[in-house]
Amino acid sequence: MRGLGPGASAPARGLRRLVTAAVLSTSLASLGVLGTAAPAAAVPDDGFGGAARTTGASPSSSASATPSSTPSSTPTASPTASPTASASADGDAGAATDGTQAPAERRLYLVTLTGAGTAGQPEDPLATVRLRAEQDAVLGRVGSPAPVYRWTTALNGVAVRLTAAEADDLAALPEVALVEPNSVRTLAGRGVATVGAATAESAGTGSVGGAGTVVGVVDTGLDPASAAFADVPGLGSAPGGFTGTCDGEGAWGQASCTGKVVAGHSFVEGFGADRVSASASLSPLDTDGHGTQVASIAAGNSGVTVRAGGDSLGSFSGVAPQARVAVYKACWTAPDPADDGCATADLVAAIDQAASDGVDVLELAVDGPARLDTVELALLGAGESGAVVVAAAGNAGRTRTAAHLSPWVTTVGAVRGAQRTGSVSVASSDGRTSGPVLSGAMAATTRVSGRLVRGVEAVARGATRAAARLCEPGSLDAATVRDAVVLCERGGVGRIDKSAAVAAADGAGMVLVNTAPDGVDADLHAVPTVHLDQADGRTLERWVAAHPLGRATLAPQGVTSERARVPAFSAGGTPDSPVLKPDVVATGTDVLGVLPASVSSDRWGVLTGTSAASAVVAGAAARLAAATGLEAQGVRARLVAGATPLRGVSVLRQGAGQVSPEAEDSEVGLLVPDRGDYRDWLAGAGRLPSPGVVLRTDGGTARRTVVNAGTSTRTWRVRVTGLDSADAVARPATVTLAPGERATVRVSVGASLADEGSIVLRSTDGLRTRIPVLVRR
């Protein structure tokens, strides 16, 4: 949907300057999220992760335009068993046992040159040729190894196999901004639960929204064989300016792309084709389920009947049902699920391709480090191409800072709102003694009763007590479990795998108990299940130990209307960064979506995690772009301005607040655009373009530009809420703006304690814009 709104046709969106390597070593140190460059010996030689290498440099004279992003036509080697493989005879390692010089190990590195990709430069028909020549010149300094990938749209760089010494040589070049080893990231979903006999609700509610836009999903691919991805009437006009195509053959070919699914690409060179599981398809086809669910939540068709177990469970709609879907598969399953993930080289290649194709919204539900790296620089280029970049904050909770701290990314945390609940009531076998009645999460609508059996006391022949305690598949004895309600402890295997084990042993129901502080989830289990928290789980365990012949009844209680809150798993921001993250939160628990037939015969499941939340926001972004005609920066600003703050939740956990899937339905009027030059800011030469404000406790002033995005002249009152200890003042007290007119709002704080609050701008007719503020030490 290119060309929406004033200035939308400019590919650089005002971000036309170059980023240098000095940018990465100085401005990132100011972010407090990236240390100084590490020498080659300091980089772990395990093929995954490792410290980034940066070096000072001056800008190159790269220009832009004609997008180009594909794997090199002459790769160094076929995909290897790991990103570190493919040794070279031209090594610099120590002597071999026979006295000859042993070859140095080669591993895959991501090399970013100074200067923007074509998306961030003025239009130039020779730009791609020029960037490739610059890449060849750099590679010529280390013997001209053939790159595995070339990137020229979102950034100027290559993925290439190098020795550690060669990587250091390239990092020392003034025309090289960043060199870092390929690594593997995890997805930001906490697990997929298949649909049983339960009531399920989709994130979307309407039949329209997102027409003319393309949502690009970088994930595990897509299974298009669902009515949610069919080319149906009512999708609206075809997206303008989109140039994506369909790659693949066999299980995924040209026929997989329809009027709904408009592009499909896969990228595996970084992960290694020899490392994928036997069931995986080396094509855009999804055999995992995560990518299909994310895409359906964001942009699945409306009016799709949800059926499971022969029962009709209502109707499904994605958040933006008229949007098209473009598939960029960069995440893979391995023989050992612990090795599943997304190689950074493949992620960057997917982002580069999406930017080249011209997606309107780019969704990335992949975790990442709390620092600026090659993936984040590629996301900057995607934003410069005109895409709204939406990414998941990650599921590390309070143990690690949110991923994607870059100000050009709309980083999304999860919120838990209304939840389906159920009760566990227990009594002695003769019914004379009643025990506690405990409440937890329950998706099923069926009431069940039976003997209450602890999994650890129902060990199948050949299984261990430890496996039965966790109700691992095949661990439960059918003779003991038949018609019983089984008490299973959380951990070891997926939550729904536990209920499947109970069902396989002919159990009637399950009580799942947490053994550590964590949230509870209303998964769609194979048998009716109540999920209890740690405290209630301990209570039930004690009762069962005292009443080994007791009975339990599981009863649905319906949907709670408790106050929306951020679940423990949703990662938050850090007060040590000048960028306030996450930007927003959205529903991220028990979100219904489509699954591949290879994962579930019913084709439906619920997804929990910040990946589900980011899918909701990606759909909301597509709706906003279609309904308002705003360019990417305007859509980002509208998402933040229209968010609803959650009471009692820190801005470091919620950002501006919760995004409504139908965000375009409410007029905002006043926006805080982030059109500033990110590359200027990276170079230390400009103001931080971010809708949030971070100030220090020793005092200071921040400025934000606001613009009247409405259709009539309005007056807004400016005031500060919260910040009680900061002696905060906002100026001016009022602003009156005609449509399109801008003003600068300042907030100043004196010396104070750490605090948080917001600047609230409320119009005389009730429209409100909120700018979150954090005062940090």
Image (spheres, rainbow, N blue to C red):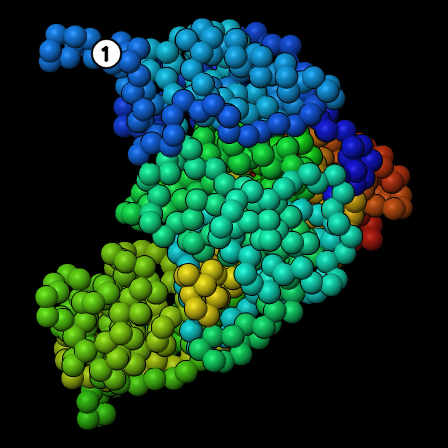
Q: Position of residue 537 (x, y in %)?
A: 27, 67
- Left or right, residue 650 beside residue 491: right
Q: Quadrant of residue 62?
A: top right
Location of the N terminus (image quadrant) = top right
- Left or right, residue 306 beside residue 481: right
* Nearer the observer, 233 or 60: 233
Residue 180, above or below 423 = above
Q: Can residue 412 be spotted in the picture?
A: no
Task: Name the residue at 66% across, 51% down.
Answer: 324
Residue 159, above or below 339 = above
Q: Position of residue 447 (x, y in %)?
A: 38, 84
* Nearer the observer, 413 or 4: 4
Q: Quadrant of residue 466?
A: bottom left
Q: Position of residue 676 (x, y in %)?
A: 69, 26
**What amino acid is found at the position of numbered circle 1 in the picture?**
Ala
Task: Name the residue at 69% across, 63% down.
Answer: 232
- Left or right, residue 459 beside residue 760: left
Q: How many marks?
A: 1
Category of crowding for the residue at label 1, using alpha-carbon neighbours closer than 10 angstroms: few (below 14), some (14–19), many (at least 20)? some
Q: Position of residue 566 (x, y in %)?
A: 48, 53
Q: Can residue 203 be spotted in the picture?
A: yes
- Left or right, residue 312 beside residue 162: right
Task: Name the residue at 20% across, 12% down.
Answer: 102
* Nearer the observer, 637 or 257: 257
Q: Of helix, strand and loop, which one carries label 1?
A: loop
Task: Residue under label 1, please give it.
Answer: 93
Task: Name the residue at 63% across, 17% down.
Answer: 129
